[in-house]
Amino acid sequence: MTAPTTNDLLDCPPGQECPVTVSVARKVKAGKEAAYEDWLHGVNAAAHRFQGHQGSNVFR
């Protein structure tokens, strides 16, 4: 038995653009919350300028 390839595991034909979901968790240092929120706003603004971007959600 051989391990499956990436193409075997994906529900997206090679050569096509398909959605991707990314989850990131961060623990913000005490007292740095405002700076983090400013940074997060900038990152989200930049991401929204990319064609095909489908949005972002932040859970606090």
Image (cartoon, rainbow, N blue to C red):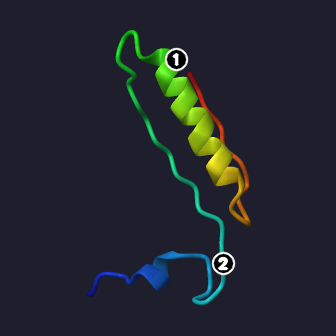
**x and y percent of residue 45 in the render?**
67, 44
Q: Do the residues labelled 2 and 1 touch (CB within 8 Å)?
A: no
Identify the residue shown where x is 47% and y is 83%: 8
The image quadrant that residue 38 belongs to is top right
Identify the residue shown where x is 63% and y is 50%: 46
Identify the residue shown where x is 52% and y is 52%: 22
Label 2 SS: loop
**Looking at the image, residue 55 lies above or below residue 5:** above
Labelled disc at residue 34: 1
**x and y percent of residue 33 in the render?**
47, 17
Q: Distance between the residues labelled 2 and 1?
A: 36 Å
Along the line of sight, which residue is nearer the eye, 25 or 41? 41
Q: Which of marks 2 and 1 is in front?
A: 1
Total numbered labels = 2
Label 1 SS: helix
Report the amino acid beneath label 2. Answer: Glu
**Label 2 neighbourhood size at 10 Å, few (<14), some (14-19), many (20+)?**
few
The image quadrant that residue 14 belongs to is bottom right
Horizontal side of 6 relative to 60 (left or right) equals: left
Q: Which residue lies furthest to the left in this view?
A: 1
The image quadrant that residue 37 belongs to is top right
Along the line of sight, which residue is nearer the eye, 28 or 34? 34
Report the amino acid beneath label 1. Answer: Ala
Can you identify the residue that label 2 sits on? 17
